[in-house]
Amino acid sequence: MFELYLDSADLERIARFNECLPLAGITTNPSILAAAGIGVNQFLSEASKILGDNARFHVQVVSADIDGMLAEARKLHDLPYDIVVKVPTTETGLAAMKRIKTDNIPFLATAIYSVQQGFLAALCGADYLAPYVNRIDNLGMDGIGVVADLQSLLERQGMTSKILAASFKSTRQALAIMQCGAAAVTLPLDVAERMLSHPAVQPAVDCFGADWRAAFGDKLSHES
Ligand code: G3P
């Protein structure tokens, strides 16, 4: 089943989108939490009240060394939520991933900019891989192409890591990622908002309402 996440720590807007979107959970990163001025514990407590017990949260470690990442992963894993630990896909991060894997802690390899980087993280046993689509585009490369190539490589090698693509600036990018078979995306709120809207929709709905009232007044469908 495809997993849709929001990439945000804006609790008010998460609550709004949770009303209409079938969210698997929320992804955060240190920059998102810092910008929102909310720590991990408070965020998880409040977000889980909004999303319920089945929500999954992807939370990134901030340690810069292997032992620190492993210790942080263990602490995050002990929290009373469904947490996937995000680990940057650096040389240090890959080393930490190998050790986190032996602890059976679910983890996501983040900050993926290339197919080979994603493949190495998959070999280290990552549950999720997070390629940064728009950031890759901004470097003059092809973010959608990287995800498509990584997806086909995972399939060809029979690997179970799931792509959870991140960093979007347009709905077109997000749709292309869904079409290439990625298992999950995490959308910033502005892109999620644009996924919901099309300028032709409300006029069409308004027209149905006007036609109905002209014929049946205030009657509801089952009363007509
Ligand atoms: O967690 C990484 C992802 O949030 C990056 O997105 O929009 O900062 O490129 P962005």
Image: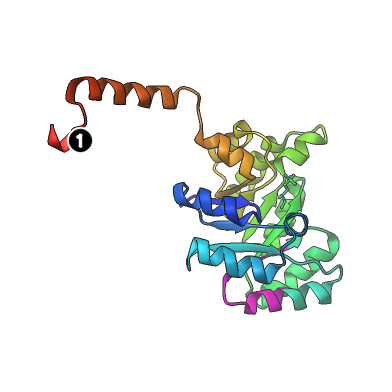
Name the residue rendered at 83%, 72% in the picture. 66
- Is residue 150 in view from this perspective? yes
User: Magenta stretch containing residue 78, yes or no?
Assistant: yes
Point out the image quarter for the C terminus: top left
The image shows residue 60, relative to residue 35, as above or below, that is below
Q: Is mark 1 within 8 Å of ligand 1?
A: no
Q: Quadrant of residue 189?
A: top right
Q: Amino acid at mark 1?
A: Leu
Measured as percent of width and height from the top left, residue 10 is found at 64, 54
User: What is the quadrant of residue 121 in the picture?
Assistant: bottom right
Q: Where is residue 69 drawn, in percent x and y?
A: 79, 72
Give me the residue at 21% from left, 31% from top: 218
Horizontal side of 224 relative to 152 (left or right) equals: left
| Residue on which the image places disc 1 | 220
Q: Secondary structure at mark 1?
A: loop
Seen from the viewer's position, the closer of residues 149 and 14 is 14
Magenta-highlighted residues: 73-86
Compared across the picture, whether 56 is left or right of 10 comes to left
| Number of residues whose C-alpha sits closer than 10 Å to that of mark 1, classed few (under 14), some (14–19) or many (20 or more) | few
